[in-house]
Amino acid sequence: MTIKILTLTIAALGMTAFAAQADPLRIATEGAYPPFNFVDSSGELQGFDVDIARALCAEMEIECEITAQAWDGIIPGLNAGRYDAIVASMSITPARLEAVNFTQPYYQAGAVLVAPVDSNIMPEAEAMAGQIIGVQRASTYANLIDQRFPDATTRLYDTVENHNLDLIAGRLDGVIAQRIFMSNWLESDEGAGFEMKGEAMLEPEILGLGAGIAVRKDDTDLLERLDAALDAIMDNGTYAEINDRYFTVSLMPAR
Amino acid sequence: MNFQVIIDSLPRLLNGALVTLELVALAALAGFVLALFIALARLSRNPLLWMPAYGFIFFFRGTPLLVQIFLIYYGLSQFPEVRASVLWPVLREPYWCALIAFSLNTSAYTAEIMRGAIQAVPRGQIEAAMATGMSRLTRLRRVVLPQAMRIGLPAYSNEVILLVKASSLASTVTLMDITGTARTISSVNYMPVELLTTAALIYLTINFLLTRAFKVLEHLISGETRAAVNDPLMAAGLNTPEAMKKIQVK
């Protein structure tokens, strides 16, 4: 009898394993956040997040399907079952943890204020009063402005590219966004004439502990597999190799 | 459905509704005035008038409104000349950019509605007006435009309703209209169903009131046709001079 149950269990396990292999894991990213995730000239999704996602899939030995999703609907889309995981530089925050589960952080960046070189704006509550600051809608940086610089006027943009366009156009006194992303932008031709003001802001209670991979609350099995795969690629050097493709500094979080 | 979330976000959404209503009202007004000139230019036989009007209508009806907004908002600001010009204080503001895009867009559609309505005025009426010696302008003012208004109003009410819905694109250039507010709140609480449903209900209410208002307006300016329906003699075809004579004889 026990043997029979055991074989049945093994068969059932085998079938779930088979099912997991047959169905590709559907991963969403934004595709508008270079160099973390973006669409290249041939229409392919590329970037640090995308490479990490691919490395995780290779580590878990499953097939993956990575698609681009608009940022402000990316969590509702996950909970609606349109995809199974979000690898999109999403910061782990208490508010988001109420809606989804996160793996351990896979990188840590912090926020910076970027403004024209000749501006004397600083990331301090008083200096920010009355300044028009651009920020991406639904990002942790919007919360940072609300809580740390309540007297600044916030303009909400659908993508970071759009707030940078308006920074160049002179509609904004500054933008607050992720440090690595902005330092890359500052090195590009577009970023000429702009600089980071003051120190990078870490603010873990607002900005979170770093970027994690979001999965549905009930998907604990996938969460464990992703966490294990993250540990593996950070240990076996895959992470470092991907990191070096995009950045000169290591983004690997302290574990 | 979390009704508490809906109730809590209502004040902010209604604030957004004010932005939407203001944008729609101003764009509809500016678009209407502009459309009148474009329609008259389009109907002119002078190529210097009808060709630009044709081109304007062709461009604004043939391209998506979102593209027009982006061209005006992000496109124009790319040119240092524009940023240095006297227009920059206006073009700098997302509000004005959205208003300009909506006004130009709706004026193109409204001009076509007006052109169709003006051309639908029976030829005989214009000939009759000519026969009484009315000048071109008097004819336009007293015969053509009042009738064209009656003919074009149902189509125009449609255009205004479309404008209310199209105004949701203002949220893409950072404006906090109904849609922008709903998207911002749902980006914090991750309850898009509640917020977007409430936003949809607000749009529905605005458009319901608008359709009623246009119904009333249609009723008010349709004096003669209504008389025709209510007059039993007219309805029976008995108000022609011959019929009248017959009745009097009896």
Image: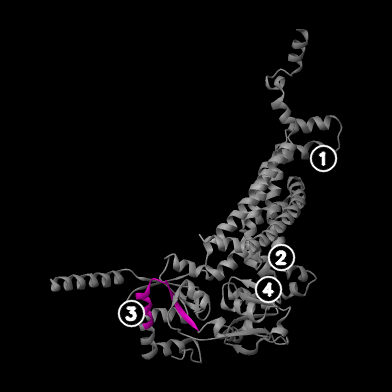
Q: Position of residue B221 (x, y in %)?
A: 75, 37
Q: Which residue lies under the disc numbered 2?
A: B95
| Within-10-Å neighbours for mark 1: few <14, some 14–19, many 20+ | few
Q: Which residue lies under the disc numbered 4?
A: B78
Q: Which residue lies under the disc numbered 3?
A: A60
Nearer to us in this view, A180 or B91? A180
Nearer to us in this view, A87 or B141? A87
Chain letter of the residue beneath label 3 in the structure image = A
Magenta region, residue range? A210-227
Q: Is residue A255 above or below residue B218?
A: below
Which marked residue is nearer to the observer: mark 3 or mark 1? Answer: 3
Which marked residue is nearer to the observer: mark 2 or mark 1? Answer: 2
The CA distance from mark 2 to mark 1 is 35 Å
Secondary structure under badge 3? helix
The residue type indicated by label 2 comes to: Tyr
The residue type indicated by label 3 comes to: Met
| Within-10-Å neighbours for mark 3: few <14, some 14–19, many 20+ | some
